[in-house]
Image (tube, grey):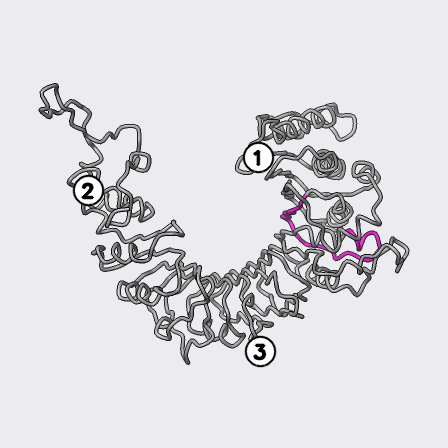
Amino acid sequence: MNEKGGNTGSFNFQKYAGERNYKIRRKDKDDDGCSEAANLVPDRLSELPESLLVHIISLLPIEYAVRTGVLSTRWINLWHHIDNIVIISPFIHHSIVDRTLMRLTSPNIKKFSISSPTQVLDKWLHWLYLRNVEFLKLDNRGRMYTAPEWFFHNSSLVHLGITNWDIKNLGSVVSWTCLKTLSLSKVLISDDQISKILSGCPVLEDVVLDSIISYVYSHADIVTRLNIVSPSVKKLTVIPVEDIETIEFLEINAPSVRYLEISGYSHGVDIRLINVSSLVKTNLTYRCNAYYYDDDEFSEDEDDFPGGPTKLNADDIHLLVATRLLKSVCHLEELKFGEQLIQALSILKLWRKPCPLFNCKHLTLHLRVLRYELPGIAYLLQNSPHLETLVIEVKHPCNTHQTTFSLYLNQVCKFEGDAYLRRERGNLLRLKNMKISHIFNLCSDNEEANRNRGYCGFGLAAYIVRSACVLEKLAITSAENGLCNCSTNCSMRYVSLLSHKSWHSFCDGKEVGEWKLRKKSSSQIIFGNARSVT
């Protein structure tokens, strides 16, 4: 690596600047060693205005931007004027970054993103502070970094994302007057400090709190209440801590938030929505892994209720949390649920407990292709009379970690998916569009896994089509960005199988009405109701 911070080897810059019509002018030597212009193709890229070239280079990671200096004489110093600094290599030495930053001449920096050790952050932060950085993302890979007090007084920051920081001692006042997006990940902070930060961000719109209590050392520092009372905050994402088992509850008070997401893994945290009166859309796809419990809690020697051997009962914290969350958001028109809530609905249905009546018009279900979710899906659809659009995202992982609910359902739900759905009846009066999207991470030759794929594929689609009297469009797709690279091409074979089964069922008109095939490709099939196909 040279002094400019990058390797001097060949770099295909044409890939980034447009490969079709631009070729770097080169000189060939004749037999006598004299150089001559043998290439008649003009170098149109170098003829562009300097400001445009600098903008193009700014779109590259800094490692590649520096390498453009070897292209020609005109390009030698162009990268010195960039205002967008993205360092993608986690192993780059801080001294190289120092020398690179010292050569930059732009008075203002728009973006700076890096994963770095802690010993040099102070110097870089001060350099960025003097250049009015707007977008700042710092992923600390070393020991937890304690930010200086002056860092919390900045009038230029618009987007801030920090990881592995200790910001308990942030001073008496926070002043981020232009900050619109704030992401805190693995940050040591208290309830009061969060409120102080929010009070110093008058235009803050989007807040992400990811494992903000992962590195706590005393109970006093544990965040148990999120008071997001700022009227400007409209979007809140909360990812609970995965590796802490001592948190009893997490209260969320966000009266102005319009979109709420709770995702990731939650080990027994009692999530309570205190005030979300402005909520319009929510994403509740969090999961509770079963290894939070001891193995003896699922002993098959016990029979606590007439459903099967387990200790799961109506007082289980996971079931209480799921039921409370379902009731808190049942009035919203746009919902996204994960397997945790769907499996909770499965248990409620098997126990013959009441299900909330949902007002949603647009529903998305994110599942992991487990058959225990089928009763919950049927129960949810039966209690969603206003549903118009349904999207089911089925993820096919290489392994299936059991959740607390799935361990129980695996013992008491002795049924075959298609047979169970054929017995269920629904009445989806307004459902017009449905999509089942399959995401294949890795292929599997496991017979059980392949059978489960059928449960969430054709059987579920057939059940919904039978229940929806005004359904106009059904799409079964395999996400192109999620396809696995395997010699057996299992994802394509699976979609092809669904296409064949769906064609005979939907298009024969014997069971679910008259349908026509609208579109078919290697990754998707789309059916349309005959009365809606022109």
The C terminus: image quadrant: top right
Q: Which amino acid does label 3 sit on?
A: Ala
Q: Are marks 3 and 1 in contact (CB under 8 Å)?
A: no
Q: Which residue position holds label 1?
A: 484
Camera-side residue of 361 and 307: 307
Q: Which span of residues is magenta-colored?
A: 346-368
Residue 35 visible in image: yes
Image quarter for residue 249? bottom right
State left or right for residue 84 relative to residue 172. Answer: left
Q: Which amino acid does label 1 sit on?
A: Cys
Camera-side residue of 475 and 493: 493
Residue at x 78%, y 47% (from the top left corner): 375
Q: Residues within 10 Å of mark 1 (few under 14, many from 20)?
A: some
Image quarter for residue 356? bottom right
State left or right for residue 385 relative to residue 532. Answer: right
* Residue 216 covered by magenta stretch: no
Q: Which amino acid does label 2 sit on?
A: Trp
> Real-space Cα distance between discs 3 and 2?
56 Å
Residue 45 got which mark? none
Coordinates of residue 529 in the picture (x, y in percent): 67, 30
Camera-side residue of 104 and 119: 119
Coordinates of residue 181 in the picture (x, y in percent): 44, 61
Q: Which of marks 1 and 2 is nearer the N terminus?
A: 2
Coordinates of residue 451 in the picture (x, y in percent): 74, 35
Q: Helix, strand, or loop for circle 3?
A: helix
Q: Which residue position holds label 2?
A: 75
Q: Helix, strand, or loop for circle 2?
A: helix
Q: Which of marks 3 and 1 is nearer the N terminus?
A: 3
Q: Which residue position holds label 3?
A: 220
> Real-space Cα distance between discs 1 and 2?
41 Å
State left or right for residue 352 relative to residue 528. Answer: right
Coordinates of residue 399 in the picture (x, y in percent): 66, 43
